[in-house]
Image: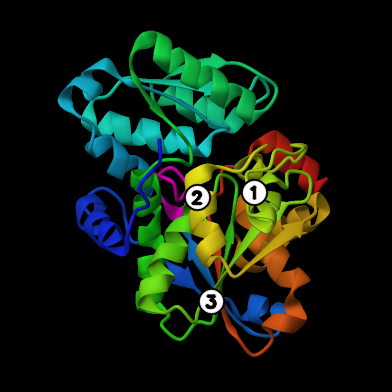
Amino acid sequence: MKLERPAFKDVLEVRGLIKDYVPRTPLYSYPLLNQLLDTKVYIKHENHMPIGVFKIRGGINLISRLTREQKERGVVTASTGNHALSIIYASNLFGVPVTVVMPEKANSAKVKTIKSLGANIVFFGKIFDEAREYAEKLAGERGVRFIHPANEPYLIAGVGTYALEIFEECPTMDVIIVPIGGGSGASGCCIVKETVNPDVQVIGVQAEKAPAAYLSWKNKKIVKDKMETAAEGLATQVGYELTQGILQDHLNDFILVSEEEMVQAIRIYMDLTRNLVEEAGASPLAAALKMKKSLKGKTVVLVLTGGNISMERLKEIMA
């Protein structure tokens, strides 16, 4: 079944729908970061959302639109953590039961938060895509709505609202750098920029150790590859049809970063901005450092998508 792409009008509609549920997140510039990158840099603080991640925007949009019967029967989804948090948070607002399938070694901090929000967790598989495939099977067996982490127009339109806020507050920017796992955040950003200002470059970032989305974009076909990164938000093993179609049409560039570069970016965020950041959220800064020469003289926005790092991982990084 061909999925219909969301349009700019859908993003505008979502903004009105979610404004009573989520805050407008800050867009800050830090002098020390500007000095480090030798250009004007703004950080879009999606880590300031109630659950510490940008995906809440899409979760509320999708859950609010379920039919009465779907809400009563509940939903099943799969996640390494942040997508699940958004769906559960939204489902609690609308009284929808949720089952989340997570990889067996999922982030302990995210697991703890998900349990506290009341969702049923099923652990399955070593990596995210194994959990996703099982979740889809489970939803079919139960006859309930399966929520795909990327191939969902309502999720993409929802997260596109962060890009609306960026364009309103920083109309003179030249570049937006955004992490890509499944690609909903970057796709939403591309949809907005194509209408508001097509001259703005949207650059995606993925981990070198999980390059499936990058390879799918580069080869213009769905590619499956290794998944060995610690960056949960970037840890996809395959590209996804809906988001890849949007990215291939509108994404300007795609950068891969190493595990070490993301760790360095986490430390820099803590040192220069006093923000706690997970690997995926830090990846745009890692990419900006890698691209420093080409960004000089430009106004750059880095999307800090989330801050849900576990204490265990943080201790490893700071050791």
Q: Residues within 10 Å of mark 3 (few under 14, many from 20)?
A: some
Q: Indicate the quadrant containing the C terminus: top left, top right, bottom left or bottom right.
A: top right
Which amino acid type is shown beneath numbered disc 1? Ala
Predominant SS along the magenta part: loop
Please indicate, yes or no, whether residue 107 appears anywhere in the rendered image: no
Residue 243: mark in rendering: 2
Task: Say which of 152 and 222 sits in front.
Answer: 222
Mark 2 residue type: Thr
Which secondary structure, mark 3? loop
The residue at 19%/29% (across/down) is 67
Q: Residue furthest top?
A: 141
- Mark identifier at residue 213: 1
The answer to whether the residues at label 2 and label 1 have Cβ atoms under 8 Å apart is yes
* Inter-mark Cα distance, 3 to 1: 29 Å
Q: Tell me which segment is drawn in magenta.
A: 46-56
Of labels 2 and 3, earlier in sequence is 3
Quarter that holds the N terminus: top left
Q: Which mark is residue 29?
A: 3
Decide whether residue 53 is among the magenta residues.
Answer: yes
Q: Quadrant of residue 111?
A: top right
Q: Quadrant of residue 171?
A: bottom left
Dot placed on the residue nearer the N-terminal end, 2 or 1: 1
